Image (cartoon, helix red, strand yellow):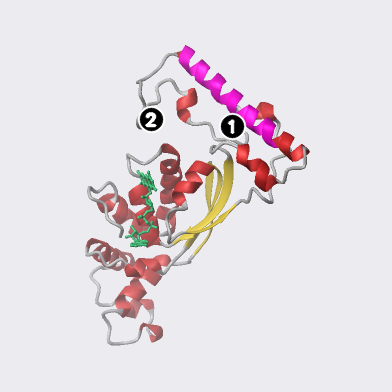
């Protein structure tokens, strides 16, 4: 899987602070400089003032201003299972690679067991991996070899059947019905920092499924660079809270 930032609002925290200050100023923010807008906020530097205001907003549950900036992420090679989970979030916008218009007719079925076209879960190859609701603990090498064999033969058979159906003239939108839920997909998604915190609350949590957790952790790392003070506060004071609520 790969995640990259395609585009994002410049100076997102200036937008957040300006929107929040609008709520409590007699003057109109539209005709003030950012320094004037932040004049009465505690702090010796603009950076300190921003952090004062942002941490105040987050600690008091004033989340509206965090809806203004937006970040667009490109995600490569997640499973359709992971895609189904993330697309449940209704305030994230998505574009998902189509299996009606993209046909995987050039994939060599021999490569499928090596991660081409299908995501291989860690429990297939890692003897020490313990997943949620797993019936057994760590397993021996022989069991892992058997798991790999079963997984590989199953996905290879699916991909071969899919390609044969394409060769027989079945349209990709119907041939795809035989492909596994682990089939890889590329996606573009965009969201605001408020939603990003909510997605992280639910999907970076220890009980979240490993693939969506990995994707969300990468998105969070990018968010920390894009919107640093907000996600510094989030990581230090909000992440891993008990009784997480939609911010
Ligand atoms: C560990 C885990 C296991 C899960 N297991 C399952 C499962 O087995 N089956 C399943 O179907 N789903 C499952 N889900 C998905 C989960 O139930 C949510 O549907 C999904 O995470 C979307 O999150 P959300 O409900 O916060 O909504 P979002 O779409 O992310 O919306 C954000 C917030 O906006 C508000 N909101 C949005 N829409 C409405 C609305 N219509 N009415 C009222 N408030 C609204 C809510 O406060 C919501 O929290 C699971 C999620 C996790 C993290």
Secondary structure of residue under mark 2: loop
Spatial separation of the CA atoms under disc 1 and disc 2: 19 Å
Residue 112 pos. (x, y %): 63, 30
Residue 203 among magenta residues: no
Q: Is residue 125 above or below residue 39?
A: above
User: Which of the pair 35/110 is nearer the observer?
Assistant: 110
Q: From the image, which quarter does the C terminus lie in?
A: bottom left
Q: Which residue is mark 2?
A: 131
* Ligand 1 within 8 Å, label 1 CB: no
**Label 1: few (<14), some or many (≥20) within 10 Å?**
some
Secondary structure of residue under mark 1: loop
Would you say 245 lies left or right of 204 here? left
Would you say 132 lies left or right of 80 here? left
Residue 103 pos. (x, y %): 70, 44
Q: How many marks?
A: 2
For the point 58% across and 45% down, which residue is it? 185
Q: Which segment is the magenta one?
A: 142-162
For the point 31% across and 58% down, which residue is it? 246
Residue 212 pos. (x, y %): 44, 43
For the point 42% across and 47% down, which residue is it? 216
Q: Determine the main secondary structure of the stretch shown in magenta.
A: helix
For the point 64% across and 42% down, which residue is it? 176
User: Which of the pair 147/46 is nearer the observer?
Assistant: 147
Would you say 165 lies left or right of 189 here? right
Q: Nearer the viewer, mark 1 or mark 2?
A: 2
- Is tag 1's residue or tag 2's residue first in the polypeptide sequence? 1
Label disc, if present, on residue 115 of the rendered structure: 1
Which of the 4 quarters of the picture holds residue 116?
A: top right
């Amino acid at each position: 899987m790969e995640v990259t930032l395609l585009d994002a609002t410049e100076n997102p925290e200036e937008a957040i602070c300006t929107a929040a200050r609008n709520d409590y100023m007699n003057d109109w923010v539209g005709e003030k400089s950012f320094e004037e807008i932040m004049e009465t906020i505690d702090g010796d530097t603009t950076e300190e003032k921003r952090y004062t205001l942002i941490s105040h907003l987050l600690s008091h549950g004033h989340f509206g201003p965090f809806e203004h900036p937006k970040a667009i992420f490109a995600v490569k090679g997640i499973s359709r299972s992971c895609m189904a989970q993330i697309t449940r979030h209704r305030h994230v916008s998505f574009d998902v690679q189509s299996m009606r218009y993209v046909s995987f007719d050039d994939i060599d079925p021999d490569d499928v067991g090596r991660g081409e076209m299908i995501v291989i879960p860690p429990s297939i190859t890692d003897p020490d991996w313990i997943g949620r609701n797993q019936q057994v603990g760590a397993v021996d090498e022989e069991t892992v070899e058997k798991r790999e064999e079963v997984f590989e033969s199953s996905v290879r058979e699916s991909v071969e059947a899919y390609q044969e159906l394409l060769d027989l003239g079945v349209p990709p939108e119907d041939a795809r019905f035989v492909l596994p839920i682990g089939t890889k997909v590329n996606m573009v998604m965009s969201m605001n920092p408020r939603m990003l915190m909510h997605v992280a609350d639910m999907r970076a949590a220890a009980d979240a499924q490993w693939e969506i957790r990995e994707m969300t952790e990468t998105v969070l790392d990018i968010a920390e660079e894009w919107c640093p003070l907000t996600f510094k506060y989030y990581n230090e004071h909000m992440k891993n809270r008990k009784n997480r609520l939609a911010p």
